[in-house]
Amino acid sequence: MDFKELKIILKRLYKVYVKKHIKNILVALLLSIVVAGTTAGIAWLLDPAVKKIFIDQDRTLAWFIPLLIIITFSSKGLSLYFARIIIIRIGEEIAGQIKKEISNHILISDVQTLENRHSGKYISNIMHDTGQIQNLVSTGVLNLMKDSFSVIALVSLMFYQNWKLALFAILMMPLAAGLARTLGKRIGKATREASLTSGNLVSFLSEILKGSKMIKIYQKEKIENEKAKKVIDELVERNIKIGAILVRATPIMETLTGFMIAGFIFFSGKLIASGDLEVNQFFSFLAAMMLAYQPIRSLATINMAAYSGAAAFKRISQVVDKEIQVLENKNNPDLLIKNSDIEFKEVFFKYDSVDTQAIRDINLKIPGNTMSAFVGHSGAGKSTIINLLPRFYDAQKGSITIDGQNIKDVSLKSLRKNISLVSQDVILFDDTIRNNIAYAKEDASQKEIERACKFAAADEFILKLKNGYDTIVGENGVRLSGGQKQRISIARAILKESPIILLDEATSSLDSESEKIVQDAILNLIKNKTTLVIAHRLSTIHNANNIFVLKNGNIINNGNHDFLISNCKEYKSLYEKQLK
Ligand SMILES: Nc1ncnc2c1ncn2[C@@H]1O[C@H](COP(=O)(O)OP(=O)(O)OP(=O)(O)O)[C@@H](O)[C@H]1O
Ligand SMILES: [Mg+2]
């Protein structure tokens, strides 16, 4: 990242996040001035202290000056405390705001965008990168104010005490500035690498957590452990590198200070001998110079915080600025459901990450209040077709209409409100069974939930659980069996009471007895509804009014079971191998 880019990023950071805190920053600024003033005050006090107490041996001032020193120190401490408190708050609030923006963006992001990036990367953005920005805002802003004022005040004092000595001391400063610039750039690069590695680590951790059973059965503990070591070692190395760059300024600054003090003592010896400098001035000057050391050093490293913060902000921007294609358009009217007739016209769709078309030239008409089934080999495009309807993805070509209204021209909210989905992989939240079902309808009464569960043949097993509807299901429902999860997701769909229902192999993990119950439940669910079902069992297909046979993303035939058996070779072979 070059300086120009840094400036642009910092400007944006300021405009969007920092500016609204400007009042508090001004208060911190005033406090910083007090800190600077008191710091210089302490150095200045050494002048009268040495002169009046040691040289003139004044009795009253021997009390008064130490008292003044105590007051100055405590004012400095208090101002610094309040300034820090204010800035800590601002930094945390800004980091919080960015975290909220990322999580909000994740919620409305396109499904494809999320699918194409590992979830660990998003977690790293929220956990790691916002920390860098918070550091930039809190440490960066405060140090910039406090330290520059302190340096100004102390240097002024040095000039006041003796301008020749001061000029000499100042000559050393440009050296430090040049050094800081190069270090800043390096730290930007190093933190980018560290963030990447931290993202990899989070991704890796989430994979070994999810894959624990696979790891055990394939006995990959050793290999995964090696991988863990590798990622962690890499992160350790990167962090050490950052740490090393951060402290790299120290030896150089120390050496510079050594030169300064040596030259300073040599030079002031001469000035004192010639009568140009008094001993008390010397002490005050020395104190000012020593006190200037810390803020100068901190200023020299401030651009490192700037570069690493900016680099983190850039990574976050890439997430937050990512354009969302399927987005609610407030001007779109609501979808008006009459019969819930569905029509696909010349629909083509390709996933971003693959070159081949997932579905090609799909034309189909599904009359309202009927059930249509989709059959075909794995990868034929059945799920893809179903996912286009709630606009999880938008077709690149062609149109999909519901009751004559293009789904792209109606509000997303009304579109999705009218569609229920029981998907191939059941998604449950780590919450109670009740809340997982009520996800479909927030204000559902217990009665409604129980009724939905009865329809889905889920009530029986739920009541057998110790905590019944209040049972916590665990992360993605790990504490339930596959069939139980599926029935809960059907109950959830029933509760939604939408006119269009999408079932993606909804009964695949049920035993034949529960399947029969669930099939009946599904018949209940789909009464007077338009249903698209991906079927893999004959029972489902027999209930369907129309069956679409898919092959390599194309619809090659459709009709009812008897028609297809005698007219479609593909269907016949599918039927003989799978559907029976
Ligand atoms: N999220 C995705 N990103 C990229 N490609 C995908 C994605 N989902 C599916 N595909 C590809 O699109 C094609 C159609 O997949 P789809 O999931 O629609 O098949 P399907 O008929 O539902 O298969 P199955 O019966 O196994 O569920 C496949 O070739 C698959 O590799
Ligand atoms: Mg599928």
Image (cartoon, grey):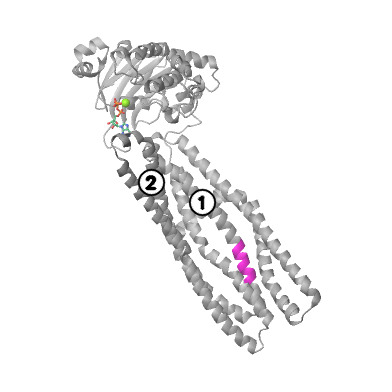
Q: Which mark is residue 133?
A: 1
Residue nearer the viewer, 198 or 345: 198
Name the residue at 42% across, 61% down. Answer: 186
Mark 2 touching mark 1, by CB under 8 A? no
Q: Which mark is residue 200?
A: 2
Q: Could you tell me which secondary element the residue under label 2 belongs to?
A: helix
Q: Is residue 224 above or below residue 492?
A: below
Q: Is residue 427 left or right of residue 293?
A: left
- Screen quadrant of the N terminus: bottom left
Q: Is residue 36 above or below residue 214?
A: below
Name the residue at 55% across, 44% down. Answer: 96
The amino acid type, in three-letter code, at marker 1 is Ile
Q: Could you tell me which secondary element the residue under label 1 belongs to?
A: helix
The image quadrant of residue 45 is bottom right
The label nearer to you, 2 versus 1, is 2
Q: Which residues are magenta?
A: 146-154
Circle 2 crowding by C-alpha within 10 Å: few under 14, some 14–19, many from 20: some
The amino acid type, in three-letter code, at marker 2 is Asn
- Screen quadrant of the C terminus: top left
Q: Is residue 565 left or right of residue 37?
A: left
Give the image location of residue 117, x and y in percent.
Answer: 38, 41
Residue 150 shown in magenta: yes
Circle 1 crowding by C-alpha within 10 Å: few under 14, some 14–19, many from 20: many
